[in-house]
Image (spheres, rainbow, N blue to C red):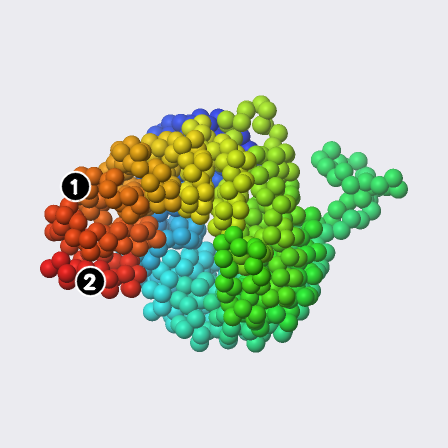
Amino acid sequence: LARRDMAQGTLDMLACEIPKKYIFEPVVSRCMSRLASADPNQRKAGIACLGVIAEGCAEPLRENLTLVMPHVFKSAGDADARVRECACFALGQISEHCQPEVLTYSSQILPIVFALLDDANIAVQATSCYVLEMFCERLEPEGVRPLLDPLVRKLASMLEATSKRSVQEMTVAALAATAVAAEEEFAPYVVGVASLMSKLMELKEEKTYSLRGRALECMGHIAIAVGKEHFRPYFGPTMQCACEGLTFDSTDLHEFAYAAFANLAKVMGDEFAPVLAELVPHLVTVISQDEGQFEQAEEEQGGQFNALDDSDEEEEGGGLVMHIRTALLETKKGGITAVGEMAAHTGAAFVPYMGEVMTVLLKAADNWHPLIKTEVADALASLVVPCVAQDHNGEITWVKGDIAGPSPMSANTTQAVAVILKALVTMMKDDTKDVVGKACEGIQRIIELCGPHALSSVANDCLENTYALLAKEAPCQQLEDYGEEFGDEDDDHDSFMTSVCDLVGSFGRVMGQHFVQYLPKFLPAVCGYAKSSRPPSDRSMAIGCLGEIAQELGSGIAEHWSTVFYPAAIAGLADADDSVKRNAAFCIGVSCEGLGEVVTSQYAAMLQALSPLFVVDITEGDTAAACVDNACAAVARMIKASPSHVPMAQVLPVMLKAMPLKNDMTENETVYNCLFGLLQQNQADLLANKHELSRVFAEAASESSKVEDELKEKLKLALQSLN
């Protein structure tokens, strides 16, 4: 057992730390050979290892799901219970780390998991619940709908039938995840499930604390799923359970309580405000607590583990050892999350607590542990919201790039924004990537809420820090010790860099033309991630960033069109990855929209490069469908910018055949307004395709369509004019 655990731990670490191209293929090939073995121990090892590497090798695994998933499904039906259990583990890991691509397999995964809930082996049943919890996290209601009723009934009956607490806990977690996936469609089940949870929330024996906490967590997730109106009858009892949990000597129950407060504040909004007076002072105390302290080390006893002591905290007077109370660390993290959600969702009612909360969060921003700092970055950004609610009726009207006129922010908002942004810009220099990513997200939230005057106070430092991150010169990027050995081309995608690139797009959104002067410095750094040698996630991120810059700056990118935007987008359209292709199509469309006649000489080449996107197989998943949708939107923008340079007779039939949009609903306005405009002009080539146009409008205006209601009404009117 110890050897197996060490082997799994070592493999997991290798998968997380070594460039993926050196570990993914060797491990997967060995897994496949073992899965074909007649020996169940070999098959168990093969499927278990796929699960072990899922976190570290998430990127290549996402790209190879078509190869891997059939083997996982086959193992889930293996005759040996140990293989089935490991298959559930692998399926859970893949469901957790390969989102959203794994959602494509929902029609296969859910029936398999449903069947495994009836498995004769208790361990398989429990692990099946874990799969449900992981898989349903980002599943849409239509994904879970076909099995929703039998699934809820099965989980409820499992919960009532078993006395094994570990299975009960996992069943409750699976119910919570199912609720989140089903959203409002879970409403008919709230009464029954809440009744089951209420019994568990009354448990008071220490050995049942974890189950009680899971039930409380489930109620919080049900609140998120069904919303304020459906959950209101259960708000009081759920809060009572959470508050009672704080009186127990259990950090686990405290942690569950804070998570419940966070979710309920998010759902109930201003109805949560009456409890702030009681909860906020408590949370401030929790966040203020010291979860670790240096103490004088005891004299060495020459024990066998002395060689493992890696403490380097010593003073001349003797050794000091850091004693960490990890349980308190988690509750502190939960407290920060809760207070952040309260600030974000209770409006002006939170303003009286701003001072003490800001003080304690700013202190926690210097905490030694990255988990705490990451939560602080998120919560700090939320502290601006109460000021905006009180002084600006919830919204600040600002003008892109306008810093010459008077600031639209009140004195209170200005002061809060200045303090918080200064702290977040400092956190961009943290040596932990997750902290830096959250700091970038926090800055983006604030400047997009408050406008260019908010950014102006920290603009220079913020821009410099952002460039350092793009150029891989920031403190958090200096700790990678395999860079020289493997080389830059072996770098894997860093998820936090997506937040950095999103912030770059936000600079364009807020600064407007003031950001143009920084393009010669920023664009080469962004394009470094678009090279063909980079992972698909990097390429997609970089092209997406260029698209956002083009959309926000319009004609401001003209000087860089032929040298940066055009070649990058054309290369992106020919990329093997659908995510890159869809972002390249978006970049082409918004560039044409912003640059107008400047780019018409390249229309033919761009249309030629876009044409293969219209034959992408949309059954391959959401990204493939989005690829076609973005191609339609790109053509629509090109038509709007310069209709005379688009060969309508050839282009419109192809575009109409690919409609209505299947995935990227944000582009509905773009494509339908384009068609409305052509229809008003009685454009001959569009009228020649009147039958196909009627089909598109009818499907887009149907009751089951995801098109917004206002646009549906326009579609219905247009449809009448065609008949």
Residue 507 image point, x, y percent? 52, 48
Question: Does 130 appear above or below 530?
Answer: below
Task: Mark 1: give few (<14), some (14-19) or many (20+) Cα within 10 Å.
Answer: few
- How far separated are the C-alphas under marks 2 and 1? 25 Å
User: Residue at position x 25%, y 58% from top?
Assistant: 705
> Image quadrant of residue 596?
top left
User: Residue at position x 45%, y 42% from top?
Assistant: 556
Number of numbered discs overlaid on the protein picture? 2
Which residue is identified by label 2? Answer: 716
Residue 232 image point, x, y percent? 44, 74
Q: In the displayed image of the protein, which residue is found farthest to the right?
A: 317
**Foreground residue, 687 or 101?**
687
> Image quadrant of residue 470?
top right
User: Residue at position x 39%, y 69% from top?
Assistant: 190
Question: Which quadrant does the N terminus fall into?
Answer: top right
Residue 50 image point, x, y percent? 43, 36
Q: In the rendered view, does 278 fall on the left or right side of 210?
A: right
Residue type for callout 1: Ala
Task: Tell me the number on the disc at residue 649.
Answer: 1
Question: Does 717 appear above or below 512?
Answer: below
**Foreground residue, 314 or 556?**
556
Residue type for callout 2: Lys
The reply to whether callout 2 and callout 1 are in contact (CB within 8 Å) is no
Sequence-first tag of 2 and 1: 1
Task: Tell me the number on the disc at residue 47.
Answer: none
User: Residue at position x 31%, y 55% from top?
Assistant: 669
Q: Is residue 350 visible?
A: yes
Q: Secondary structure at mark 1?
A: helix
